[in-house]
Structure formats: C-alpha cells, structure tokens
Amino acid sequence: MAGMVDGKVAIVTGAGSGIGRESARLFAAEGAAVLVTDVDEAGGAETVDLIAGAGGEASFLRVDVTSEPEIAGMVGAAVERFGGLHCAHNNAGISDPPVDFTDMTLESWNRMIAIQLTGTFLCMKHELRHLLAAGGGTICNTASGASFVPAPGQVHYTSAKHGVLGLTRQGASDYARQGVRVNAVCPGLVDTPMLRRFMASDPAMAEVLPTLPPPGRMATAREIAECVVWLCSDRSSYVSGVSMAVDHGQVLR
C-alpha cells in the first residue's frame, strides 16, 4: 500500500528535535523525500540519520527562519535536491520562561515574534511562490493551544501563535482556487525537549501534569506528526483553513 505522501517532496523546519523530527520521520516513512531544516546542525543531522536508517530519503540544510535569503534558499534546495516541492511543515519555534506581561522586554517580544510569526510568514511566502507556479500543494503550520487560549506568562508566544492562525487562514483563503491548501495543527502539552526545558524553568508546571484531563498524559510528538502528515496528504483533500486542536480536548476544559 502506498504511503500517504508517496512520491512527494516535503520541507520540515525545526526538524532537529521534537515535533519537527517526528514529522520529518513520518513524512519519510509515508513515502516523501524530506528536506530537514533547523539551526541545530547536530540535531538535524541526527534526524536525517534516523530517516536513512529506516530506509527513507532525507537531506539536511541549516536554515534560520528569521533570514529571508536562507528561506528562499531552502525552497530552492528542496527543488534542486529532490526535483520539486509538494508539502511544507512550518514548525520552527522557541520557548521562554514565563514572565509577567508588564515585565516582558522588547528584546524577548521581538525575538519570539521574529521566529514564531515572521518566520512562518517568510516560509509561507516562498513556499507559496513555488507551489502556485507548480500548480498546487499543501502547507501545515504549527500553531498551539495558545492560539485559542492565553498561555500564562507568555504574552509574546500567545500573540505569535494567534498570528499563525491568521497567516493560515489568509493563505487558505487567498489560494483555494489555485490548488493550494493551508492548515495548522494546534498542539496542547507535548512531551518534547523544548517543553521539558520550559517546565524546568517554571516550578509551577510540575503541578500541572497531575491535573491533565484523560488520558492523563502529554501528547507524544508522533501523535502531532500524524495529524501534520495527514493534513499534507491527499487524504485530506477537502480540508483547508483548519486550525486543528490536537490536545485531547484540553482547550475545552
């Protein structure tokens, strides 16, 4: 049986660990050639090794999503190395320790917005240029539960992730008639190295885990990746502009 994205080419940003790594691995397992990108060269190389070890096809490129020339080069590299581009998972992101709204520094605000929001915009801009010229394709952005409800002590993150939904809806609306679908996944708490670092920076987070609703655990990165690859596949061919909460109903409680 053919994989969900058999014969396609995918880009995954922030693929050196966590959700991005599992997304890249699943894209490859489901038949895509994957351009793995991250600023973490060691992590990105490890992701490529994991894919190659499982019989998949992948290549690594160091990309800083705040650099428009690097993003333009990323799209060009996918086309040059694999012969095209069909799917993109814009996932690169950062986390910061919680801080009161009134204590948020402009430096922290600008850095978060540059990576989480402007970086997603720049990726979409250059991915869309290629997809439109090629006759269509799919984009999935990583948003967050904080796209729906505020994350305490995270005014910059909450604002950026609300903005990612705006970008997603704009892209879906603008290019629906040109064969391009744009969606977003909105994870809740996901067991990733980044979240573990965030939890270590905020002792109050240790009190949150026992209160999680059923099934009483964080999501795995693979569970988020399953949704990403499905949204980028032809199996979701009538789905666009969706902000998919992947949080076991956490935002409902």
Image (cartoon, grey):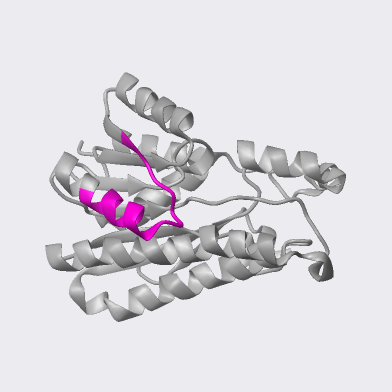
User: Where does the image place residue 31, in percent across and percent down from the top left?
Assistant: 24, 37
Q: Is residue 60 above or below residue 129?
A: above
User: Where does the image place residue 218, in percent across and percent down from the top left?
Assistant: 66, 42
Is residue 152 located in the magenta-colored stretch of the structure?
no
Q: Is residue 12 visible?
A: yes
Q: Is residue 108 above or below residue 52?
A: below
Query: Residue, x 44% and y 42% (percent of image)?
Result: 38
Residue 107 location, quadrant: bottom right
Query: Residue, x 58% and y 67% (percent of image)?
Result: 160
Q: Is residue 244 above or below residue 94?
A: below
User: Where does the image place residue 183, in percent across and percent down from the top left?
Assistant: 40, 64
Is residue 71 located in the magenta-colored stretch of the structure?
yes
Q: Is residue 129 left or right of residue 245?
A: left
Query: Residue, x 27% and y 76% (percent of image)?
Result: 176
Which residues lie in the magenta part?
Answer: 60-76
Query: Residue, x 32% and y 47% (percent of image)?
Result: 11
